[in-house]
Amino acid sequence: MIYSEERVHFTFEIFKRLERELSSKCNTRFLYTHNFEKVINPRYAKKVPIHRWYILKESYSPYLIEELVKAKVVRMPTKGVLDPFVGAGSTLLGSQWIGTPSIGVDIVPFFCLVSKVKTLWKSYNIKVLKEIYEKVRRLDVEKEPNLGFPTLSTFSRVYDARILRELLVIKEFILDLNKDLELYKDLLKVVLASILEPTSRAKKNGKGLKIVRKGPLEKPKNAFLRKLEEVINDLSVVHYFLRPKYASAKVLNDDARQLGKVPKGETDLVVFSPPYLNTFDYTEVYKLELWFLDFVKSRNEWYELRRKTFRSHNLAKWARTEYWSHEVLNKIEDYLRKQELWCEEIPIIVRGYFDDMYLTLKALYEVTYDECCVVIIVGNSAYGGIIIPVDLLIMRSALEVGFIPEKLLIVRELGTSSQQLRLLRRDMRKLLRESIIVLRKR
Ligand SMILES: C[S@@+](CC[C@H](N)C(=O)[O-])C[C@H]1O[C@@H](n2cnc3c(N)ncnc32)[C@H](O)[C@@H]1O
């Protein structure tokens, strides 16, 4: 199947309609820029000291905030920065490095741990870490672990039993460390999490794990020691050479749609990247980490956590809701209902996604300071041969909540599955973009 004129027309019409509405109602500006390409691209995030201890495939760079301030997209925050989808802590590290206190929220406890561990960089003593390194070096990983294998069957598919035993011995070593090393236990858990994928046969691939190797690349103990060296190295670089500014950072395991644990009036800048409308579920993609580190211990717990995630995927059953409505969104839903899609829940997910975003924006409006600026990094999506203007719809719903959609910085084109690409006319692909939305609270 190739593109149809009807879909092309539909797509351009809904984009134009929303752009016209935003420009006329609040003078929104639409700008093309390559300026932020590096700082929002995960490829570069991988190179930043401390941040690289563990990043998500979707993480941006901590330098994003500094770049936004330098380019005068936002004013220097003085009260505090908030990220309601903190992931691997990019916003929090970036806030620390410009000297502003910050709060990060995530529904997935494992990501809360990652963010907490990174933002404690100033508290780690390199000498203690070197002692731990020596202990791991002497650790007998041939012995039988006392801990049992995780019950999730994926583990037996992606690991050789010998490798899994070695990983368990390392886990046991971490859990058995003295109470006075509590701070380091968390750090070591993140180090352990970071080697789960490279020591397995699988690779994170789009929506889940894909078996890509016959044998593991590296033995867990070697991989763990190598990562620990990286941690020690990064801490030396940051403590003695880069010496960035420092400010407190708090991490809360909470739901972005409620933000019940976030104190009010402490935030004058919000920066975040929500789950994209791409049917990826974080509790699936990061299941090895969640299960191995005991964040979920049963399928029930796993599903419970999944149910609390943003409605951007089809791995949970969602009911249709309609908290926010707009003619364009209604048209998209009607259109999708008439298509033969690979998953029949897509129309419900699309609706749920914008409802969840609306709830998040409302919650943000409640907790932020007047004049607060909100920066959202988001990508558009393609379903059924049309492109969904995720960026414009978010801006339109933000207007309803009370934010002024000031500008949309269009940064780069995104890819999609080859099936979807075939359905898109060449000139439609530029609408499949990653953008930076800038809102201001009025
Ligand atoms: C695109 S990632 C954020 C990446 C982050 N900006 C970074 O640089 O690492 C989206 C995050 O949203 C989180 N999330 C999903 N549903 C959520 C919810 N209901 N409340 C809060 N966080 C949620 C996911 O766990 C994931 O960490």
Image (cartoon, grey):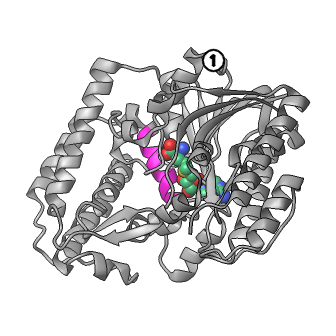
Task: Say whether residue 99 is visible.
Answer: no
Query: Residue at coordinates 32% horizontally, 26% vertically from top-left?
Result: 238
Q: In the depicted view, which residue is nearer to us: 390 or 12?
A: 12
Q: Main secondary structure of the magenta part?
A: helix
Q: Is residue 308 left or right of residue 295?
A: right
Where is residue 210, by image quadrant?
bottom left
Identify the image quadrant of the N terminus: bottom right
Is 110 contained in the magenta span?
Answer: yes
Amino acid type of the residue tagged 1 in the rendering: Met
Q: Give the image location of residue 97, x and y in percent.
A: 47, 24
Q: Give the image location of residue 294, x and y in percent.
A: 43, 70
Q: Is residue 125 left or right of residue 30?
A: left
Task: Say whether residue 7 is visible.
Answer: yes
Point out the stretch of residues depicted in magenta: 109-118
All told, the count of numbered labels is 1
Q: Is residue 338 above or below residue 253?
A: below
Is 373 contained in the magenta span?
Answer: no
Where is residue 270, by image quadrant?
top right
Label 1 crowd bin: few (<14), some (14–19), many (20+), radius 10 Å: some
Where is residue 369, by image quadrant?
top right
Q: Is residue 163 above or below residue 234?
A: below
Query: Residue at coordinates 89% horizontally, 43% vertically from top-left?
Result: 400
Q: Give the image location of residue 114, x and y in percent.
A: 44, 49
For label 1, the residue is: 76
Query: Residue at coordinates 18% horizontally, 41% vertically from top-left?
Result: 130
